[in-house]
Structures are given as structure tokens and as C-alpha cells.
Amino acid sequence: MEAADKKLILVVDDEPRMIRFIRMNLELEGYRVSEALNGLEALEKVRDELPDLVVLDVMMPQMDGFETLERIREISTVPVIMLTVKAEEEDKIRGLELGADDYVIKPFSPRELSSRIKALLRRVEMPAPMGKTAIKVDDHLTIDFQRYEVIVDGKPIKLRPTEYRLLYHLVNNAGWVMSHETLLSKVWGHEYRDETHYLRLYITYLRQKIEPDPANPKYILTERGVGYRFVDFKRDRVD
């Protein structure tokens, strides 16, 4: 594989030893690796180098990983895996709410990090669009799978890759209940089928973007204890 064809991973950590450890193992896996020792340097690298994925440590001086992630999300939708020494659910949820795509808890094995990176890179590869350019659900909502956006009241709203994949599978099975396990396996990968908090968060993100009243959804319906269902609709396609 030519060097230019290899995925570029940006590793952000204030510990040079940790960066060397991650770099060595990722290069053995066939990735190109860039590095940053702090949040500001990471932002510059995201803007200038356009990495395919960012591995971002939470515990850094001055600008911590959470603040860095917020700043990254202002300029980029690049996939981000957070590294944290804390296993508390609150830290995981906070990172995901700020826009992280996944997290790995220190200490971790090279195999675990590599597995997470591969799963995330697979996830951000978009599935093929359904049919023609757009599907009109009703006068309020049109979903344009070709452009990876939804049109709400005539205004386009961009979707992040994981939001797009989740909506794709829900709409493609409109009228049918999709279990938590099925959605997690299809959108995140088989190894994530028990990570229900991922699904809850991204359902919330989608509802905030497409529902007239996210607190009382009309499109993405909860089937309590089972999963979610996209409302059945006549599939009018818009050319």
C-alpha cells in the first residue's frame, strides 16, 4: 500500500512515552501516525493535516481532552476516540455528549485500541444511498441520503457519520421495530451490542435534529424495553 493510501491517525497525549507506545503499534498495523502533545497543537494538526481519526487523551494540562474535543467539533467531524484513566460512567457519557465517537480506558492493550480504531473507521464509511436522491417523509421532513443530510422545514441539517448510519438503518426498516442489539451491531459493530448508552445518546441527537418536538417524537419512536421504530410512511422520493 502506498504511504498516501494509509489512514492517518493523530495521537494527542502530553506523555511522550505513551505517544511512542501508540505510534509503534499503529505503524505496525499499517497506519500513518501524527502526534500532538497538547490541545492547541492538536487543533492545528486537525486543521492542517486532516487526519482520518484522532486518539485523544482526556487528562492533559491547560486544555484538557474535553475542551480540546469541543474545539475540534467546531471545525471538524473527524472520528475521535478518547483515552481516559477514569472508568466512571459520567466521564464516558460526557465525552460522547461532546462529540466523541468512542473511548478506551487506560491501561489498554495495543490489540484493544487497534480493534476500536478499525471498528470506528468502518463505521464512518457511509452505506450506499437508498434509491434516488431524497425521501420525503412528510411536509416537515425530507431525508437526502445522497448528501448525508436531512431537510427540516426546507433547511438542510448536516449529519455526523454515526447519526447518518443510525438514521439510514431506521428509515430502511420504517414501520418495523429494531432491537437495541440489532441497531448497535449494524451501526457500531457486533462488539458494541451491549453498549446501549451509545444508542440512547445518538437517538437523542437525531431527535434534536429532525423532530418538531424532540420530547414528544413523531418519527423515531421508542418501543420500551425492545428498541426503536421509525414511523411508517409512504416512500415518496424526490428527484
Image (spheres, helix red, strand yellow):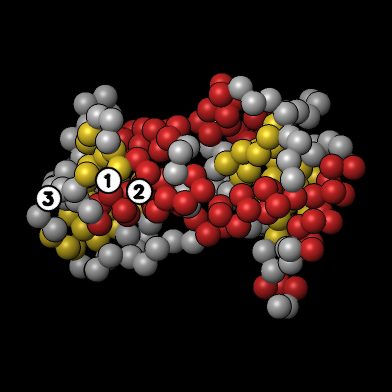
Q: Quadrant of residue 70?
A: top right
Instruction: Name the residue located 84 percent from the left edge and 36 percent from the top edge.
Output: 14
If you read the primary sequence from the N terminus, does the residue marked by circle 1 or circle 3 appear first? 1
- What type is the residue that disc 3 sits on? Phe
Q: Nearer the viewer, residue 12 or 185?
A: 185
At mark 2, the secondary structure is: helix
- Disc 2 and disc 3: Cα gap in Å? 22 Å
Disc 1 versus disc 3: nearer the observer: 1
If you read the primary sequence from the N terminus, does the residue marked by circle 2 or circle 3 appear first? 2
At mark 1, the secondary structure is: strand
Identify the residue position indicated by label 1 in the image: 178
On the picture, is 149 further left or further right than 52? left
Look at the numbered discs 2 and 1 and tell me whether their residues touch, using CB distance below 8 Å.
Answer: yes
On residue 233, the disc is: 3
Q: Quadrant of residue 219?
A: top left
Disc 2 versus disc 3: nearer the observer: 2
Residue 47, position as x, y percentages in the image: 68, 51
Q: Decide: few, some or many residues near mark 3? Use Cα within 10 Å; few <14, some 14-19, many ≥20.
A: few
Look at the numbered discs 1 and 3 and tell me whether their residues touch, using CB distance below 8 Å.
Answer: no
- What type is the residue that disc 1 sits on? Met
- What type is the residue that disc 2 sits on? Thr
Q: Nearer the viewer, residue 237 or 2?
A: 2
Identify the residue position indicated by label 2 in the image: 182
Q: From the image, which quarter does the N terminus lie in?
A: bottom right
